[in-house]
Every structure is written in C-alpha cells, then in structure tokens.
Amino acid sequence: MKVATARRGLAGLVAEGLNVRALERALAPGAALQSAITAWPGLAPIDAIRLVAAETAAVGSPVICDVFSGKGHQAVVVSGIVNGEPVLQLLLAAYDAQGVIARLTSFFKFMYPFTSVREQVRRELNDLPQAVWSMPAIAPDDGAYHESIRNFDYAPDLVFNSPVLRTGATPESIAYRVLSHASSVYGVRRWSDFALVSGTKQLRFFNVDIKGQPLWLGNVLTFETKAIKEIVSFSRPWASALALYTRVKARIGEELGGAFFWPDLPDYDAYREQQDRSPQ
C-alpha cells in the first residue's frame, strides 16, 4: 500500500496490512472493535477482529489518502476498488493512556461497493452467528421534510459526497436539498465532542437513527476560509446505510437522476426479504 508520509499508530498498521495477527498484536487488552458491516453487540472479541480485518482486506488496490490525528484519536481514509467500483473506507482509532489502540471503528462510503464488501465477508466468515447479518424491519418513511440545520457555513460551490450515493451533489442549492432530505430521514444529529484536523480538513462524527435503527457517520469537511467547500461522508452499519439509500432514492431519485444511484441495488425491504429466504 502507498502512504504519502510515514506515520505511527493506525496509519502504519493500515499501511502494513490490517490482518487478524496484526490487529491482535496492536490492540490493548479488552479493546473494542466496531465493524462497518454490523452493529450486533454479541460478537466475541476475536470475531470482531476477524470482521474488521476481512472488510478491510476486501478493498482492492488500497491507498491511504488522508490521515487525521488529535485528542487521543487517529483516523485513516483509504481509497480502493471493489468489483470495479471506487470505494472509500474510514478507520478511526481511539488510544488509551499508554498510546495503544483501545477502540477501532470502521466506516464505508458508496452503497454498492459497501454491499459488495458485506457479501464477500459473509461468504468468507460463514461461521459467524446469523444475527451478524440480520436486517430488522424498519417502519416506512413518513415523507416529512425539513431543511437541514446549518451547523456550518457552506460555499456556493459546495460538493456533498453522501455516504450512500454514487456521485457528489453540487452546487450548494442541490447539495443542501440532498442534505435536507437525508436529515429528514434520520432525524436530529448528535455530534461527537471532538474533531480531528489535517490541513484545511476536519473530521467530525455524529450518530442518528432511522426509525429506531442506529446510524453512525464520519464526515470529512474541507474548508475554504470559513465556509465548507466539500463534505465527504462515511456510514456504518451496512443495514442502516442501505435504509438511508433506499429512502433518499424514493424521495428524490427522479429529481436527481440515475447518475446518483445503482440500478441493480435493491431497496432495503427487498434485500431483507431476499436474505430472509436464503438458506441459513
């Protein structure tokens, strides 16, 4: 893997290969691993390690494109390819007082390759409990719309790269409309109390829920003076991300056009029913 600058901690670990053995050596005792694929709380520690290692290994031709550090955390953004589609993975490490990784969390951007990663890992780790792959029923979208709260100033040429859509929404008027529909689906953002910085970029996190289904998002904000010029968002877990994709597509799919979506990616309920009928 290519790395722009040699770094310690998570960046070095990712550059060398985030496999099971490397993770076991790098983690503090009792460290928590949070997979991008599932938020099921019943995973054994070794299975959580296997999941994060497998979903990271699924990213082909990986290149570290951003590293963020600060306040006992480090985050790495990796670009790559899955089944011919570009994908981005975000890995966030929290360090203990000794500087050892105490928590590692994985996020993805782009819904279709995220789904491909999940299916590949599911085939490879077919001994994991079925609950890992479960997709709970979610109440239908009520269609209510409210404008997104402007937590920051936006530049007129703002580009919003949604965690689930295929292409960025721009200029600001369109980007803000997509942001507003997304926030109408998932409700009030609960922001974390820390931000990581790299040059003109900040990495911030928030969590929400979709009709009771939790969704966590990491957001790379690129500033131009005091206004945000670009937002690149990552999400986890997979089921909640697919629910967001489905609802945004149903709301403004025709308005945005086909370039923003994948024609062969089913909606949440169709995918859930298909997997429920699959042999266990």
Image (cartoon, rainbow, N blue to C red):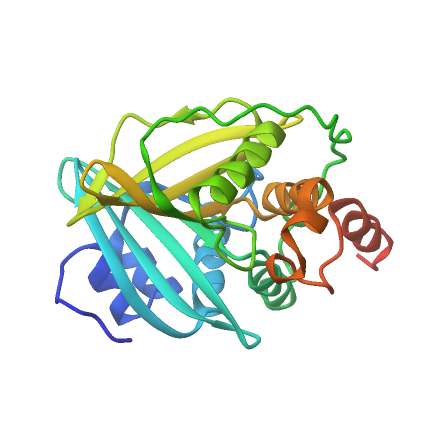
Q: Position of residue 21 (x, y in %)?
A: 34, 65
Q: Position of residue 14 (x, y in %)?
A: 29, 64
Rendered residue at 48%/64% (across/down): 54
Q: Does the image show residue 202?
A: yes
Is residue 71 or residue 260 the one in the foreground?
260
Q: Is residue 107 left or right of residue 195?
A: right
Q: Indicate the quadrant containing the N terminus: top left, top right, bottom left or bottom right.
A: bottom left
Is residue 265 or residue 165 the one in the foreground?
165
In this picture, is 57 found above or below 169?
below
Q: Position of residue 27 (x, y in %)?
A: 28, 50
Rendered residue at 24%/44% (across/down): 223
Is residue 251 or residue 59 the one in the foreground?
251
Q: Position of residue 264 (x, y in %)?
A: 74, 65
In this picture, is 219 found above or below 24?
above
In this picture, is 190 found above or below 169?
above
Numbered disc total = 0
Is residue 236 or residue 34 the one in the foreground?
236
Q: Is residue 73 left or right of residue 175?
A: left
Rendered residue at 30%/41% (across/down): 228
Q: Does the image show residue 104?
A: no
Rendered residue at 75%/25% (across/down): 142
Residue found at the very far right of the displayed protein: 277
In this picture, is 155 found above or below 15?
above
Q: Is residue 3 left or right of residue 175?
A: left
Q: Is residue 136 left or right of residue 232?
A: right
Q: Indicate the quadrant containing the C terminus: top left, top right, bottom left or bottom right.
A: bottom right
